[in-house]
């Protein structure tokens, strides 16, 4: 079983809908949680960075971390076709430490 | 512009011919790392460096070498490339206090 599990999708939603993404993990030592967006043939781009449990909001993006359940989420409000990409969750034990990635969820936002 | 720069972006080479993929960052980051991305396997860490002259193996270091002689540069060396090293490679960097890694645009390597 993988250390970080993520549904590969694809997740198809109409423009304007809320996109809901999540990851589960098994290593209780993870303390830093990230979401990256990756367009085809591009490098991953950091969207959200959180430490420990709680919520964080940045514009249309909200990240949630529930360490007790070993579950993290990313919500994208008012989704746009430009949000169509692969979304990767990543986590680490310490700041700057090795990132362990989920496999990525492909998201398609249809106009 | 703050960025991680990798070169080359695309490379086709033959088995056994030594090659180097360069990586440079302009953000004064202490940590640098190399990842490879393969279908079905995701992103996996090859090597990482916590600062100048400090490097360590990641999850898949076999067949690779790195060096960190300057803070801004972290080249990836394949002494004798083999077809199973055909992959998409990413260099990344971050501060030692965290904040998330910044990734380069990637190097697509094909070994024939």
Image: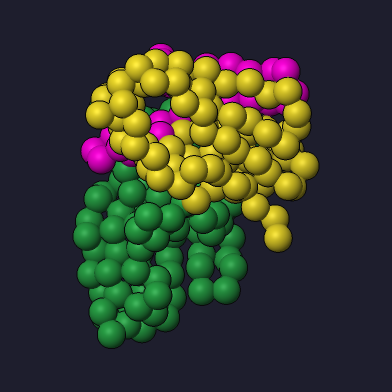
Q: Which residue is at 31% across, 26% downward?
A: B14
Locate the C terminus of chain A by quadrant. bottom left
The answer to whether residue B14 is visible is yes
Question: What percent of the width, then of the height, locates residue A13?
Answer: 26, 74
Q: Which residue is at 25% across, 29% downward?
A: B112
Q: Which residue is at 36% across, 83% downward?
A: A16
Q: Tell whether A41 sits left or right of B104.
A: left
Is residue B45 rendered magenta in the image?
yes
Q: Tell whether B5 sits left or right of B11.
A: right
Question: What percent of the width, then of the height, locates residue A100?
Answer: 45, 34
Which image quadrant for residue A10? Answer: bottom left
Taking A23 as reference, is A110 above or below it?
below
Taking B35 as reference, is A108 above or below it?
below
What range of the chain is rendered magenta?
Answer: B36-63
Q: Which residue is at 35% across, 17% downward?
A: B16
Question: Chain B's colour?
Answer: yellow
Taking A52 as reference, is B47 above or below it?
above
Q: Nearer the viewer, residue A82 or A25?
A: A82
Q: Nearer the viewer, residue B88 or A71?
A: B88
Q: Main secondary structure of the magenta part?
A: strand
Q: Nearer the viewer, residue B108 or B18?
A: B18
Locate the N terminus of chain A by quadrant. top left
Question: Chain A's colour?
Answer: green
Is residue A47 rendered magenta in the image?
no
The total number of labels drawn is 0
Q: Tell whether B24 sits left or right of B15.
A: right
The answer to whether residue A87 is visible is no
Question: What percent of the width, then of the height, locates residue B22?
Answer: 57, 35
Which image quadrant for residue A15? Answer: bottom left
């Amino acid at each position: 079983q993988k250390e970080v599990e993520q549904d590969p999708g694809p997740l198809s939603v109409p423009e304007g809908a809320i996109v809901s993404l999540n990851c589960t993990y098994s290593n209780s030592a993870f303390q830093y949680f990230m979401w990256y967006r990756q367009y085809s043939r591009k490098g991953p781009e950091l969207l959200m960075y959180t430490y420990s449990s709680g919520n964080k909001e940045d514009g249309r993006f909200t990240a949630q971390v529930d360490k007790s359940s070993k579950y993290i989420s990313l919500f994208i409000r008012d989704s746009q076709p430009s949000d169509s990409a692969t979304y990767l969750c990543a986590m680490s034990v310490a700041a700057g430490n090795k990132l362990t990635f989920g496999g990525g969820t492909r998201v398609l936002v249809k106009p | 512009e703050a960025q991680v720069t990798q070169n080359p972006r695309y490379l086709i080479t033959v088995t056994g011919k030594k090659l180097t993929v360069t990586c440079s960052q302009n953000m004064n980051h202490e940590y640098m790392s190399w990842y490879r991305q393969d279908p079905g396997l995701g992103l996996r860490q090859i090597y990482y460096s916590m600062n100048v002259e400090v490097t360590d193996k990641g999850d898949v270091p076999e067949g690779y070498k790195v060096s960190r002689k300057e803070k801004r540069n972290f080249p990836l060396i394949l002494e004798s490339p083999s077809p199973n090293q055909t992959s998409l490679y990413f260099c990344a960097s971050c501060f030692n206090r965290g904040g998330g890694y910044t990734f380069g645009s990637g190097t697509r390597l094909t070994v024939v």
